[in-house]
């Protein structure tokens, strides 16, 4: 776990830095707010193909795949040093799409590697540590990246990101984990599509995974609306400049670090469906509190949102690793990732429209009511056979 988390931290630092700088970079070269916003979409777009991309993680051994993916991105990123004018921005977008595709496969391979390399009762703690490691980088990387870009331009950020991929590859290479070679993949036409469809079917047919991933998808949908409303909260509710949103996000990040530290111990005591329901309830209640014109309420709500939302995601990821067949974890994990995060991207756009038409003092309480209602139904749901027992160490 030490080497694995080292890889997560260093690659997460570089990824967060690149995500922030790419928008600033495009804005400075083109002057277009729309093109700058599209950098985030370029990174998200490959998630739509998550089930298809995740199939690769089930066809090869996962540790060598992680190493190869990281080294490939380290080799591709220096091409961005050529992006010095507006007419070359297309190359930045092309690399960002590759970046997003690499991330989709990488995430599926990581989850599958943990599922096969750790005892099931340790998965919750491992996913919690992974969440903490990833969120911790978001507290430092944006400031470091913005300062580096302002002082030296885009080139050092690109090279820093490439270097973090090399370091991550070295960390994954140092892992000592026994992996059984996967079954020989079918080579006939259509085999890849059939395997992808099997991953979707396994997720949809599972009485444990289907409601859990559904809870996660609703949470991320509401989170998208909540995220789109943050500037309205800062401006209209708190009468603060837009930059104050950075303070709220930093407090939310601190809450997410705490969420990662507590998720594992909680999953040893309660089933995943209850942790997910509790996380959704915390998130929803805090989103409603954000409607209050109080700085203290806004800061508290941000911390609680940071605590609740990751609980839902950790619960869903852990359930996928525990329930999916070992030979299909990559496909099922990638499918779950798509179901979880595509609603968030769509809701960011929907929320931007809603915020202009609906007062946040009305919109956010509606978000809270929807989330609390779903959380209550999810908590009261009759657990599937073996769902609770497997989480107490008897599975």
Image (cartoon, helix red, strand yellow):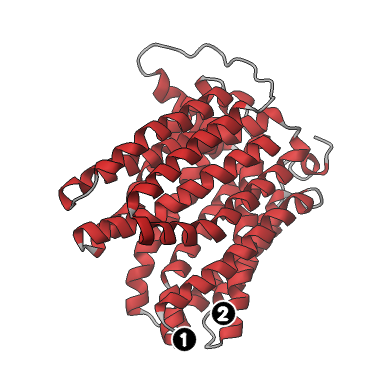
Quarter of the figure with residue 136: bottom right
Decide: is 165 above or below 62. below
Q: Nearer the viewer, residue 205 or 393?
A: 393
What percent of the width, then of the height, locates residue 113? 62, 30
Decide: is 370 above or below 22. below
Q: Secondary structure at mark 1?
A: helix
Residue occupying image coordinates x 58% and y 26% = 63
Q: Are marks 1 and 2 in contact (CB under 8 Å)?
A: yes
Q: Secondary structure at mark 2?
A: helix
Measure the alpha-carbon separation of dots 1 and 2.
9 Å
Q: Is residue 211 left or right of residue 161?
A: right
Q: Nearer the viewer, residue 64 or 3?
A: 3
Q: Is residue 373 visible?
A: no
Q: Is residue 360 left or right of residue 280?
A: left
Q: Give the labeled residue for mark 1.
A: 237
What percent of the width, then of the height, locates residue 82? 24, 42
Residue occupying image coordinates x 48% and y 58% = 144
Label 1 packing within 10 angstroms: few (<14), some (14-19), many (20+): some
């Amino acid at each position: 776990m030490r080497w694995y988390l080292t890889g997560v931290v260093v690659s997460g630092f570089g990824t967060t830095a690149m995500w922030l700088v790419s928008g600033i970079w495009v804005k400075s070269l083109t002057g277009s707010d729309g093109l700058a916003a599209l950098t985030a979409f370029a990174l998200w777009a490959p998630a739509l193909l998550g089930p298809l991309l995740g199939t690769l993680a089930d066809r090869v051994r996962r540790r060598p795949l992680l190493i190869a993916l990281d080294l490939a991105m380290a080799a591709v990123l220096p091409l961005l040093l050529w992006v010095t004018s507006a007419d070359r921005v297309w190359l930045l977008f092309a690399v960002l799409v590759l970046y997003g595709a690499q991330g989709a496969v990488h995430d599926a391979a990581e989850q599958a590697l943990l599922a096969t390399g750790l005892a099931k009762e340790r998965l919750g703690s491992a996913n919690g540590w992974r969440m903490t490691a990833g969120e911790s980088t978001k507290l430092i990387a944006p400031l470091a990246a913005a300062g580096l870009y302002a002082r030296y331009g885009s080139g050092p950020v690109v090279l820093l990101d490439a270097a973090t991929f090399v370091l991550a590859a070295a960390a994954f290479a140092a892992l000592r984990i026994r992996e059984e070679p996967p079954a020989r993949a079918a080579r006939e036409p259509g085999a890849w599509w059939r395997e992808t469809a099997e991953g979707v079917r396994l997720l949809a047919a599972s009485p444990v995974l289907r409601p859990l991933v559904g809870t996660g998808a609703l949470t991320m949908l509401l989170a998208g609306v909540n995220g789109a409303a943050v500037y309205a909260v800062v401006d209209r509710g708190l009468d603060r400049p837009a930059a104050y949103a950075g303070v709220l996000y930093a407090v939310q990040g601190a809450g997410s670090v705490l969420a990662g530290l507590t998720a594992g111990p909680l999953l040893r005591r309660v089933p995943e469906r209850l942790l997910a329901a509790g996380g959704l309830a915390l998130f929803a209640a805090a989103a409603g509190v954000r409607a209050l014109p109080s700085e203290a309420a806004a800061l508290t709500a941000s911390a609680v949102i940071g605590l609740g939302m990751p609980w839902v995601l950790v619960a869903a990821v852990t359930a996928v690793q525990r329930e999916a067949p070992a030979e299909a974890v990559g496909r099922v994990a990638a499918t779950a990732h798509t179901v979880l995060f595509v609603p968030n991207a769509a809701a960011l756009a929907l929320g931007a429209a809603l915020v202009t038409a609906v007062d946040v003092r009305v919109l956010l309480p509606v978000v809270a009511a929807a989330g609390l209602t779903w959380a209550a139904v999810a908590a009261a749901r009759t657990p599937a056979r073996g769902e609770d027992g497997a989480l107490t160490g008897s599975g």
